[in-house]
Image: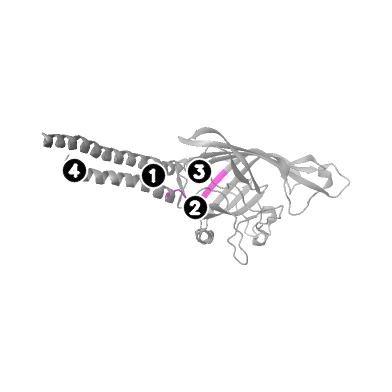
């Protein structure tokens, strides 16, 4: 083997080994982060639901509920908090509106309480950009970049983290996504109603529109929901007709199932089987909400194949997972194999032809 060819092969071999190292230990970690400018919309349908109508003071059945979630990243806050904590985080503002009308829109006047949705929850969460784990951030003063939870549109009603509070101690566990490289194990996942995290277990593998997913399930046992103020209801609703009002409790339980794309940790589909009641003296008296609600087909397809909504590309995790898997696995593996083969050829050629040359000289 000529000296020039040997030098070229050595150079190519070292280059390929270098590419393998760079893609594995530099390119992949740089790309496997949640986008700070994330925008996402999901729609969930809950047919045949049972709800308690506050306006009519009675239980209504066979109601079709629709829940719309909007997630929007705050790039400025994410950069600020990342620098303050010296770690890569993302900040997402989320809003979930649930109502018994399609495409619900808030009234133009907040005083029109009869036109408000059946349920509204707004949150700001700070997440580790790689693991999806919630990060505690509660700055003091006039800094409003911190996490919060609220059920109204009024800024003054936002609950800030308080370790001593029974209402909101702060976000914990996974909230909006799973880690990059999700494993088949148990994680802790956030429940907004109870405002704490519960274990969510890996159950099985599945496939959604050709995309391999991991299925996780979370069982939240029945318990009382913390209230900002005592829940008062008319006595006749809970078997106390002689009393104008009594103090009641709100209970809640849920079975949450999530379909996760494991490379990116994205939630492709979600389903909840909720049961909330109004209890009096420890006994359930009224059904507040009973529903099985899950992402509609359009949302699941968008998450798998991608779609444009309001001029913004959303979802498309099948292609994103393929690209990330290629960079994190196939590119470094193939580059390493090619590099080692080239270096092996050089070594083999040198050993073989070098020995032949040596023997020729000795003869």
Q: For residue 14: magenta?
A: no
Q: Nearer the viewer, residue 24 or 291?
A: 24
Q: Quadrant of the N terminus?
A: top left
Q: Quadrant of the C terminus?
A: top left
Q: Nearer the viewer, mark 2 or mark 4?
A: 4
Q: Which mark is residue 5?
A: 4
Q: For residue 33: magenta?
A: yes
Span colored in magenta:
31-43
Residue 102 visible in the shown view: no
Reply above or below: 4 against 348.
below
Tell me the distance, in whole angstroms, between the alpha carbons under discs 2 and 1: 22 Å
Q: Position of residue 340 (x, y in %)?
A: 30, 39
Residue 145 visible in the shown view: yes
Q: Nearer the viewer, mark 3 or mark 4?
A: 4
* Residue at far right of view: 242
Q: Give the residue pinned by disc 3.
A: 265
Tag 3 or tag 1, which sits nearer the N-term?
3
Q: Secondary structure at mark 4?
A: helix
Q: Nearer the viewer, mark 2 or mark 1?
A: 1
Q: Give the residue pinned by disc 1.
A: 327
């Amino acid at each position: 083997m000529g000296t020039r060819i040997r030098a070229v092969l050595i150079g190519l071999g070292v280059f390929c080994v270098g590419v393998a190292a760079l893609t594995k230990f530099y390119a992949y970690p740089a790309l496997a982060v949640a986008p700070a400018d994330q925008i996402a919309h999901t729609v969930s349908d809950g047919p045949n639901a049972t709800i308690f109508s506050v306006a009519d003071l009675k239980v209504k059945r066979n109601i079709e509920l629709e829940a719309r979630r909007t997630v929007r990243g705050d790039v400025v806050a994410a950069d600020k908090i990342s620098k303050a904590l010296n770690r890569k985080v993302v900040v997402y503002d989320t809003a979930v509106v649930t109502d018994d009308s399609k495409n619900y829109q808030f009234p133009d006047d907040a005083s029109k309480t009869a036109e408000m949705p059946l349920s509204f929850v707004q949150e700001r969460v700070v997440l580790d950009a790689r693991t999806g784990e919630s990060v505690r951030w509660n700055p003091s003063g006039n800094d409003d970049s911190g996490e919060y939870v609220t059920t109204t549109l009024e800024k003054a009603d936002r609950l800030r983290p308080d370790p001593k509070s029974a209402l909101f101690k702060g976000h914990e566990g996974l909230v909006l996504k799973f880690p990059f490289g999700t494993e088949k194990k148990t994680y802790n996942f956030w429940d907004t109603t109870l405002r704490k995290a519960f274990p969510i277990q890996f159950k099985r593998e599945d496939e959604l529109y050709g995309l391999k997913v991991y299925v996780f399930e979370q069982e939240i046992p029945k318990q009382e929901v913390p209230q900002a103020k005592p829940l008062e209801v008319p006595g006749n609703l809970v078997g106390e007709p002689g009393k104008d009002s009594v103090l009641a409790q709100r209970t809640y339980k849920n079975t949450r199932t999530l379909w996760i794309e494991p490379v990116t940790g994205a939630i492709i589909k979600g389903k909840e089987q909720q049961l909330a009641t109004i209890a009096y003296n420890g006994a359930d008296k009224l059904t507040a909400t009973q529903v099985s609600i899950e992402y509609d087909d359009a949302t699941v397809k968008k998450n798998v194949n991608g779609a444009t909504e309001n001029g913004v590309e959303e979802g498309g995790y099948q292609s994103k997972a393929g690209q990330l898997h290629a960079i994190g696995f196939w590119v470094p593996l193939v580059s390493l194999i090619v590099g080692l083969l080239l270096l092996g050829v050089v070594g083999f050629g040198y050993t073989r032809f070098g020995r032949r040359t040596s023997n020729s000289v000795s003869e």
